[in-house]
Each structure stands twice: as C-alpha cells, then as structure tokens.
Image (tube, helix red, strand yellow):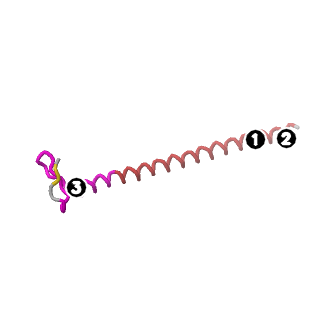
Amino acid sequence: MEKNNKQNKSLTLNNTQINENSLFTNISQIIEKRKYQAGMYANREVTLIYIKIDYYNYNEITYISILARESQQCQ
C-alpha cells in the first residue's frame, strides 16, 4: 500500500485507487448507525425491565390486598 496524492488523500492498493475521505466517511457512518441501534436496543431493554417490575409489583400488591381482605372477613 503506498500513499499517492496527499491533497486527494487517496491510496493505491493492488493497482486500485482508494479515496481515504470516502473510506473514512463510510466507516464512520457504519459505526454511528450501529451505536444508535445499540442505544435504542439498550433503552428498549431497560424499559421492558421497568414494565416487568411494575407488572410484578401490581400483581403482588393485588394478591396481598386480597389476602388481607379475606383475613379480615374471617375474623
């Protein structure tokens, strides 16, 4: 791999000209897209955790309330 024209920032690899700016831009876009998608996935999973905790708490509180009510009625 040898550097060619510094102004155009291009390389020659196996007789193929590669534009470094274009290469950098494309790789940067791939990385940014994946970072965004990873962030969305993480946010979704955290949201699901809170939903499941709320669901569990609601069911537990409801069950305990029913048991307490039945206990008071039996006395």
Mark 2, secondary structure of its residue: helix
Judge left or right: residue 73 versus residue 66.
Answer: right
Check contact, mark 2 vs mark 1: CB within 8 A.
no
Residue type at mark 2 is: Gln
Judge left or right: residue 23 versus residue 40.
Answer: left
Residue type at mark 3 is: Glu
Q: Along the polypeptide, which appears first: circle 3 or circle 1?
A: 3
Q: Is residue 71 magenta?
A: no
Seen from the viewer's position, the closer of residues 3 and 22 is 3
The residue that disc 1 covers is: 66
Mark 3, secondary structure of its residue: helix
Judge left or right: residue 6 versus residue 33.
Answer: left
| Circle nearer the viewer, 2 or 3 | 3
Q: Along the polypeptide, which appears first: circle 2 or circle 3?
A: 3
Where is residue 61 shown, x and y percent of the image?
A: 71, 44
The residue that disc 3 covers is: 20
Around disc 3, counting alpha carbons within 10 Å, would you say few (fewer than 14), some (14 to 19), or many (20 or more)?
some
Seen from the viewer's position, the closer of residues 5 and 47 is 5
Judge left or right: residue 31 versus residue 48.
Answer: left
Q: Residue furthest right?
A: 75
Mark 1, secondary structure of its residue: helix
The residue that disc 2 covers is: 72
The residue sitting at 35% across, 51% down in the picture is: 31
Where is residue 64 shown, x and y percent of the image?
A: 74, 40
Around disc 2, counting alpha carbons within 10 Å, would you say few (fewer than 14), some (14 to 19), or many (20 or more)?
few
Q: Is residue 19 magenta?
A: yes
